[in-house]
Image (spheres, helix red, strand yellow):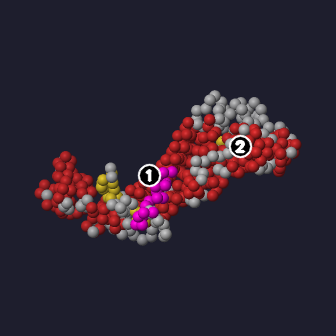
Amino acid sequence: MLYVSVLRGRAFDMIARYTHPEMGRIWSDQRRYETWLLVETAAAEAMAAAGIVPPEAARDIRERGAFDIARIEEIERTTQHDVIAFTTAVAENVGPSARWLHFGMTSSDVIDTAQALQMREACNLLLEDLDRLAAAVSARAFEHRLTPVIGRTHGVHAEPTTLGLKLALWYAEIGRGVERIRRARAGVSVGKLSGAVGTFAHLPPSIETDVCLRLGLEPAPVASQVIQRDRHAELLSALAITAASLEKFALEIRGLQKTEIGEIEEPFAKGQKGSSAMPHKRNPVGCEQVVGLARLVRANCQAAFENIALWHERDISHSSVERVILPDSFLALDHMLRRFTRIVAGMVVYPDRMRENLERSRGVVFSGTVLLELAKKGVSREQAYEWVQRNAMRSFAEKRDFKALLLADADVGAVLGRDDIERAFDLDEQFKHVDEIFDRVFAETGISEPAGPAEPIGSLRALR
């Protein structure tokens, strides 16, 4: 049975524009059979070294072993068994020594060990993708380390933050994604040659150890007929979490690109069209695609969980599923990473609009700081909250400047002087720990802040 992908056709062509060509090759039928032959050759050489098969047989398998996909498919139409079709096609090229090909092995010894090589190779490409994305995010984070933007909780203005801090948060999450995929890569980088039910009835464990050593894998400590699928589920979980992180990042850009917010846009290329009906449209289609594909990778993760439970020592219910979810998940996530890296690198930022939005709430976003200033002066928290809230509500209702209302409030004025109130609205004070946060996030990257002193941000008034 060949690899089947729900991403074939137009969808596959769309994803292929951003997917690394090597990722497609890893999950091609050609590469699948290449890895099968690699396992068969390593097994023959290990058995020859142990005196189980003649050395000349191992040599013939190594030197003459070859296959033609059309021939394999022709044989499989009769055998209805892909590994038998493969070994038969290879045997036609090897000649008499082919009686030692696949000696003492079962199909899953080949399939699962070879698939481990493919998954490891595909993980390596994803880790390279993540490195490139991390570099793009860190560059934009330092660029906008002190670019003020309103923070939003529940979709409502909360307190000021910086665009750099938003991106630093992404960077840290990407790092956790890297560690998950590394752990999952180690978990699936195992092979097995323990036979039909895992008892090593026909080959000693030393052959499995030798083959895995030759292939750079770890031998599974124990297996049934198959390597246990909790390993694969862990890998798909790592991919799904990474996809969900990308979805989160892309969703933030989409939200900030709304017309009424207008703080960030994904890049819009010259000649690009946003709508067949509305020439003015610049839609976040790249981010929307990332969000959509994350759903696919998550769904594949669920299928991987279903593959864990197999009847007794093995059934085949997982096999057809993996021929879809493994290539599709790797191809989709590779595409998502590469496309989102381009989006981050070309992301258009509108600092003036960010400042305009920050001012839109007339200063009430500094209410928490004013509350604390009153508490420091001895006012109870409950009393301070009441004074600050009533002025904030007046600011909303009467569309008046919050700071001006505080300065005119007799209760507040009896406790806080003008300098105290001005300090509560100072963005430099709000962001005084940004550098420390950046040091914590980027300490291990070797990235330093741009040369030259950072310009002070100043108060909200200075931004106007």
Q: Which mark is residue 248?
A: 1
Quarter of the figure that contains the C terminus: bottom left
Q: Is residue 232 visible?
A: yes
Q: Which residue is mark 2?
A: 212
Question: In this image, 269 relative to 227: left or right?
Answer: left
Answer yes or no: do the residues labelled 1 and 2 have beta carbons within 8 Å? no
Q: Which mark is residue 335?
A: none
Front one among 377 and 322: 322
Helix, strand, or loop for circle 2?
helix
Tell me which residue sits at (67%, 41%) in the image: 112
- Which residue is at the far left? 410
- Which residue is at the far front? 277
Q: Residues within 10 Å of mark 1 (few under 14, many from 20)?
A: some
Question: In this image, 458 relative to 115: left or right?
Answer: left
Tell me which residue sits at (52%, 55%) in the image: 336
Helix, strand, or loop for circle 1?
helix
User: Type of residue at label 1?
Assistant: Lys
Give me the C-alpha separation between circle 1 and circle 2: 39 Å
User: Type of residue at label 2?
Assistant: Cys
Q: Residues within 10 Å of mark 2 (few under 14, many from 20)?
A: many
Q: Is residue 43 visible?
A: no
Tell me which residue sits at (46%, 55%) in the image: 288
| Region of the chain picked out in magenta, as a range | 276-293
Question: In this image, 414 relative to 357: left or right?
Answer: left
Front one among 386 and 300: 300
Locate residue 289, reporting x and y percent.
Answer: 49, 55
Front one among 16 and 243: 16
Q: Is residue 282 magenta?
A: yes
Tell me which residue sits at (58%, 50%) in the image: 7
Quarter of the figure that contains the N terminus: top right
Locate residue 31, reporting x and y percent.
Answer: 69, 51
Locate residue 119, reporting x and y percent.
Answer: 63, 47
